[in-house]
Amino acid sequence: MSGSLALIEALKKQNVKIIFGIPGGAILPIYDALYDERDIRHILMRHEQCAAHAADGYARVKGEPGICMATSGPGATNLVTGIATAYMDSSPLIAITGQVPTSFIGKDSFQEVDIIGITTPITKYNYQIRNVKDIPRIIREAFYIASTGRPGPVLIDVPKDIQTDIDDVDFNSEIKIRGYKPNIDPHPLQIKKAVDLIINAERPIILAGGGVHWSRAYDELLKLAELLMAPVVTTFMGKGAMPENHPLCLGCIGMHGRVEANESIMMADVILAVGVRFSDRTTCKVSDFCVNAKIIHIDIDPSEIRKNIPAYLPIVADAKKALKSIIDEIIYRGLKKEKSEWFKKIEMIKKEYSDNEIKEELTGINAVKLLRKVLPEDSIVTTEVGQNQMWASLYFKVLKPRTFISSGGLGTMGFGFPAALGAKVAKPEVPVVDIAGDGSFLMTEQDLATSIVENIPVVVMILNNSSLGMVVQWQRLFYNRRYSNTLLKGVPDFVKLAEAYGAKGVRVNSLNELEQALKEAINSDVTYVIDVPISSEEDVLPFVPPGKNLREIILKR
Amino acid sequence: MKEYILVAIVEHKPGVLYKVSNMFRRRNFNIESIAVGPSEIKDLARMTITVKGDELTIEQIIKQLQKLIDVIKVSKLDPNKSVIRELALIKVNTPDSKAKSDVINYANIFRSRIVDVSEDSLTIEITGSSDKINAFIELMRIYGIKELARTGAVAMSRNFKSFKIEE
């Protein structure tokens, strides 16, 4: 069997149904093998970066690896932003790249790039295949590494001669990874100590991160919160780990966290942090972050413990298993918390900062709130990066798990639209909406072609302030309104742009028109671009300025 | 900042040294020295890494090393319970017989060996702790060092049980 066929066969054994990619010289044999393949759908993208983001979006919705493919050299380097995005948000992306033939490696051959060297710091692991015989094992290992423990991207580089070489391959070969044994089960003693701490806490709080999504610890999180009557706040990556309309859920903390969330965590005496890495955008000034609270830190990645903040009690384990053990221990001890003073205080704070009503004006905030009103609960929302993303974080209440997809760690502009395509492929039965900004959308809009040709209808709601809004906001606040290179001056006409690709485009001038457009768009069988003109003067507030702590929050301009 | 010696058992295959050294660079950790060679098991290599830092940094270095999939095992050696050795080759300027005999004398005191002699230089092989080698090098600077090569420390715990890899 040829290397190419072995690769496809091995992918099928991993249940791969979808590949996002673009062919090129050094990956021709694999694409030739794909030509006859009926069980795998290859979605031809218009830029490799979008292939990576789409596969990432697919992975985040499905909770299993998404696959992207590109040729050597520029094809491979174009994947890099997407791989780094997946790495920062612990998403199980599998990237397969063509490479020049083995004998050409190191000779600066045409379209040769050292993609192994380039992606080493942004992958969980990477492989360059040297023998056809190794292909089944490497593919199995790659999927195992990408999807277990703390998930992350794996790259497989396939030299062209390996794609065409013929050899006997054994698809049942054992995998053997000596240096990789994720610790799944929590230490029982640590669980007992954790229960002692939270049961005796006066003001306990749960901080849920992206790890809750990846381990699907939703039921456990909800059950534990209700058992303890403890409020739940999330990191940005944890958003939606608990339904955000639940009375105990206070939303995201962080630089653009909800005030009630930031306030509450800073008052807590015990923090049960699960699947979080305490990023700088979450903690803000880290030396002021909950200094008097005892932090129980649950994470499957031991290197996260004490990396950014001191943990009073570390638990290295899978989030779901750890939470389940804590619940079992609480139930075993027969403890159940009633509504405490703390709970009443939380209720009060929550009421004080409640801002669900939608005002008349066509603003970014109102558009996002309106979107929630219009969208069915199980719809998927992706975001770009910048103001659009932070408005979504603050005002779009996520009600179902895995329905909010956004580039948190790397903050990749241009992520939302291709990720929406990936999400739609993963879950064709629900509407998918990209909350976009004009700046971000222009970075990957060429894949409107993909959405039309491949029939992947999504909705792009562009909050169009004709500027790089978040940068403008920082320039307004910290650089004396010196808008250096941030005003995009409105080009292009997004309606015409959409139409040029065969998509539908509409510009709205009021919230009423937006509501109409959204209703039409989510029922449309073709991609819809909705241009929502807003003011570039609108800020994302509240805002914790850089270097300040979670309480030093700006509420109003 | 204290100096620590870490021993990492890693897969003996291409690219692993790059992955390890790249991790140090990208996370802003400094390597004082690194020595790599085969271990007692055929397809595993042994790295002895000397690093400086506070306790928290060292803890992070160990965890980040362990996180690398090609790294099988990492341990921090206790200097009091370990054998730590470094080898250096030093080519010293010895233009006259006085200098030669002086250097030979010092070499004997430091229990090192003369491995090459030429008209105007002596090459000395010295093994020992880094401190001992540093002291000897300082002494040799008086005469002028023409060339210097050091291996970096290799180390092993004295405790028999402490570092056995299962095959």
Image (spheres, coloured by chain):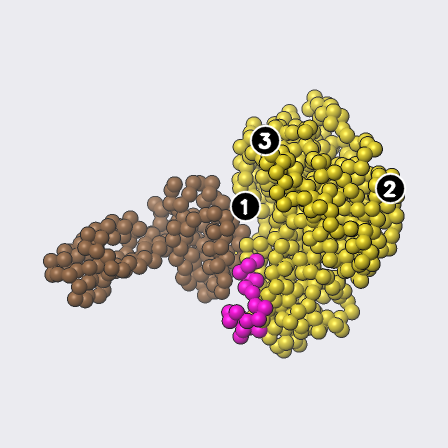
Chain colours: A yellow, B brown
Question: Does the magenta portion include A113?
Answer: yes
- The residue indicated by pointer 1 is A303
Q: Position of residue A232 (x, y in %)?
A: 69, 34
Displayed quadrant of residue B126? bottom left
Looking at the rendered structure, whether the residues under marks 3 and 1 are on a common chain is answered as: yes
- A108 on left or right of A15: left
Question: Looking at the picture, which amino acid does disc 1 mark?
Answer: Ser
Could you tell me which residue is drawn at 72 percent across and 44 percent down? A466
Can residue A72 be seen here? The reply is: yes
Q: Is residue A383 above or below residue A105?
A: above
Q: Residues within 10 Å of mark 1 (few under 14, many from 20)?
A: many
- The residue indicated by pointer 2 is A513
| Disc nearest the viewer among 3 and 1 | 3
Can residue A265 be seen here? The reply is: no
For the record, the magenta segment spans A101-119
Res. A549 mark: 3
Instruction: Calculate the distance from the C-alpha at mark 3 to the C-alpha at mark 1.
Output: 24 Å
Question: Looking at the picture, which amino acid does disc 2 mark?
Answer: Glu
Secondary-structure class at tag 3: loop
Residue closest to the far bottom:
A166
Residue closest to the far left:
B98
Residue closest to the far top:
A341
Question: Looking at the picture, which amino acid does disc 3 mark?
Answer: Asn
User: Marks 3 and 1: CB-CB under 8 Å?
Assistant: no
- Precedes in sequence: disc 3 or disc 1: 1
Q: Residues within 10 Å of mark 2 (few under 14, many from 20)?
A: some
Question: Does the magenta portion include A418?
Answer: no
